[in-house]
Amino acid sequence: MRFYEYEAREIVKRAGIPVTDFGFATSATEARAIAERIGGPAVIKSQVLTGGRMKAGGVRFADTPDEAEQHAEAILALEIGGHMPRGVLVDPKAQVKQEYYAGVVWDGTRKRPLMLFSDMGGIDIEQVAEEHPGHVGRGHYSNLLPFPDYQAKQVIAAAGVTGSALNRLTPILARLARLFRERDMTLAEINPLAQLGDGSFVALDAHMEMENEGMPRQQALLAELGIGADEGTREGHEPSPFEAAVKAIDAADHRGVIQGKDTGFHGNLGLVIGAGGGSLTLTDAVRGHGGRPANYSEIGGNPSVAKACGLAKAVLRKDGVEKIAVMMSIVSNTRVDIVARGVIKACLELDKDPAETIAIFRIPGAWEEEGSKILDRYGVDYCDRSVSMHEAAGRAVAKIQGAAA
Amino acid sequence: MSILINEDTTFIVQGITGREAVNLTRECLDYGSKIVGGVTPGRKGRDVHGVPVFDTVQQVVEHNGGRVPDGSVVTVPPAFTKDAVLEAIDAGIGLIVIVTERIPRGDVAQMVEAADARGARIIGPNCLGLVVPGVAKMGGIGGPAKNTEQAYQPGSVGVMSRSGGMTTEISSTLSAAGLGVSTAISIGGDAIIGSSYAELMPLFEADEQTEAIVIYTEPGGRMEAQLAEWVAEHNSRLPIVAFMAGRFMDDEEMKGMSFGHAGTIVEGKEETATEKIARLEAAGIPVVERIDAIPDAVRELGAHA
């Protein structure tokens, strides 16, 4: 779950980290009102869930409320990386003495949160780490014990910072570290963390990502930020009609689990495959044989006939799909006969001959004999575990290429 | 020999009255595993396939004359998993298999820290457990006992996999080829797991039955890099063969998308399939392109049937 900058700054502010007197506007008139309240030069920033705003012209400087209004109008109409902005953030233009970087991420190998700090802020931290390793401080911390400030201090000091800046920065990084933990974040970043002319520090930009699995227990915060359940997890792309259809079929029946994705897939071989690792393996295998998958899918957990049928239908209805391959790894709890029934039903209901439409059926597991009987009756080509996943995928690809020739 | 469990291993099932838990209890008992109790708060006095159910782990220990079970399979809803695992750790249980998926990383990190502090080991979360062919299994791995018997023959190869289903697919392939499996572990598909490949390697290293290792891996995370580092630092006697699924995720159009498992998302450039394959091969770990090529690759590196 990604947050817009204005939300991320609000989260930072609630954690006790100083921010500027910014405002969020969805119209040029609102932006003007905020600029008037600020009463001096302002920065107008596009609020989009993508990078590269500056380059795209999504960040502009205004000396007067008139200018702020004009810039806001232009930015609100500006698409960046395929995204239209949700609004603009209007920020007082700060007199920055120096820019710092403060961030927290997960280290999956050490299984602990990792603090990163640099006195070279405003640019990409990975670039700083590569080019100026001496300017980056790092430190893991416990996710179980209370977080002590000194751990933040050590990280800042390791980046070469001392004097009053060190003492002023320590509580800021400590609060960011606690926020990361308490709010189930996978990324909490303040960049730049700016030191102003008077020596004080303020978060000039913030980037926050919350783990989807943590969202159920962060409902209060999400509600306070005005983020409704209808926004989902704000995936990078809008669900396609196929993706939405599969989701609806899955939600309609609690038995079994199905998933479908077709963003980035453009082929002619529909895949009813599963699950998890098996789907990854089979998608690779189809491509490895020169086949062109029309989608990615997962089916497992012993689904009902209706669910297997629903997924197969959704795949068969996709533009360009000529045949489908029904393949799984060895799944002992998913009943082969039920999947076979569902997939054949889908073919028949769409007036397609199962023998022609199903390029291959490979599902070893429970009720295999029953499954074979059904597949035999409709003349569907099938195989058991003695034919490897790779070979099964190869047979499906050969069939669809043979049909095209 | 085997790692982590053997014919004497006793364990409990936390959340034993849930639908999936009832199934895995049946499957484990049929396979010969020793399940000495189950826990579901508020359900004390019931039984699941003859296994007595208690409200607390402590009650199971008392019921067993003060003997602490060796392990626990935890299959409770994500919001309650951390508490269940902390209860097991506190009771002194040394091996905890977490089946539950969709647990926030923060909770997993806390469980791992607590386990480390008490010398306990966590397998998972988001896994199917582990099996020592012909001896015992802990978790739903392999499914019903007769299916598990069919897919897992005792042998010389240790298997570690981020996918539960593919643990069985690979083991079945090794069994059909006559190599068989020493211990197979579904290590879990999340971004943070209790035991990574590198963390389990010393156990396989010490197991005389194991002559080679096969790992199943996916894009996302740095666990393969950690394994490559382990191999470089230790003069291991065990050859390793890897299989990498999800190569298609390296396509430009798939950037930032997650497939299959929660941990299977590329968040940094070193987490792509291409980078991982290069890293593993640089460490002398061949990465095969097909599951059915695994047995020959294992034999080439010197393991015996």
Image: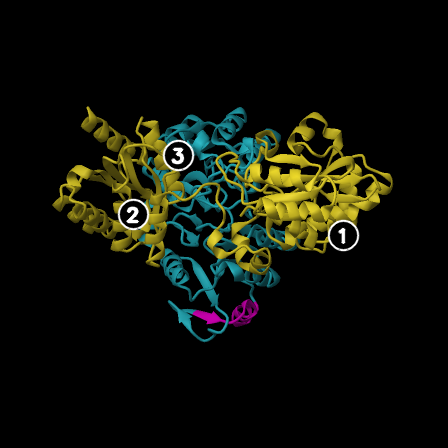
Residue at label 3? Answer: A264
Colour of chain B as rendered:
cyan
Snapshot colouring: by chain
Query: Is any part of residue B146 visible from this angle?
Result: yes
Residue B57, magenta (yes or no): yes
| Residue B278 vertical placement versus A14 (above, below) | above
Q: Tell me, by letter, which chain the rendering colours yellow.
A: A
Query: Is any part of residue B1 visible from this angle?
Result: no
Residue at label 2? Answer: A311
Marks 1, 3: nearer the viewer: 3
Q: Secondary structure at mark 3?
A: loop
Residue at label 1? Answer: A148
**Disc 2/disc 1 C-alpha distance (Å):** 51 Å
Dividing the picture into quadrants, the one containing residue A243 is top left
Q: Which residues are magenta?
A: B52-66
Dividing the picture into quadrants, the one containing residue B178 is top left
Query: Is label 1 on the same chain as label 3?
Result: yes
At a point 27% along the width and 44% down the height, the residue shown is A363
**Disc 3/disc 2 C-alpha distance (Å):** 19 Å
Q: Nearer the viewer, residue B260 or A15?
A: A15
Left or right, residue B208 beside residue A16: left
Query: Is label 3 on the same chain as label 2?
Result: yes
At a point 53% along the width and 60% down the height, the residue shown is B79
Of all residues, the one furthest to the right in this rendering is A163
Q: Nearer the viewer, residue B26 or A147?
A: A147
